[in-house]
Image (cartoon, rainbow, N blue to C red):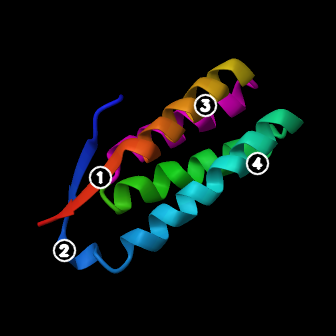
Amino acid sequence: MAEKILVELDSDLRELIPEFLERRQHDLPVFRQALEAGDYETLRTMGHQMKGFGGGYGFTELTAIGAEIEQGAKARDSQAIAAHLSRLEEYMQHLEVRYK
């Protein structure tokens, strides 16, 4: 995923997206701390929330990653969760939003 990941969103969301993305950046260390602590309930809850709001804002990849984190937490699969968190981090680093 070294290239830019382009997401085109409706211009009506322009004012909401910067704060939304900033919150996702703040979620990353919380996810990592929960994983280190073996706090699968926090991971499950946060993954579930990301699954729900990702699509609502037009970020289908966030929805998919959130669902995978949620499933990994239910299975208590720390390796899968770590892989999904790496995917999330890479996605956030390469994300470019354009408005139409």
Name the residue tied to disc 2: 11
Name the residue tied to disc 3: 71
Residue 18 drawn above or below residue 93: below
Q: Position of residue 95 (x, y in %)?
A: 35, 48
Residue 16 drawn above or below residue 99: below
Q: Earlier in the sequence, mark 3 or mark 4?
A: 4
Q: Which mark is residue 96?
A: 1
Q: Position of residue 14 (x, y in %)?
A: 28, 75
Q: Nearer the viewer, residue 73 or 33?
A: 33
97 with respect to 69 (left or right) = left
Disc 3 to disc 2: CB gap under 8 Å? no
Say which quadrant the C terminus sits in. bottom left
Q: Nearer the viewer, residue 79 or 92?
A: 92
Q: Amino acid at mark 3?
A: Gln
Assign a secondary structure to mark 3. helix
Which tag is nearer the camera, tag 1 or tag 2?
1
Say which quadrant the N terminus sits in. top left
Which residue sits at x=70%, y=31%?
74
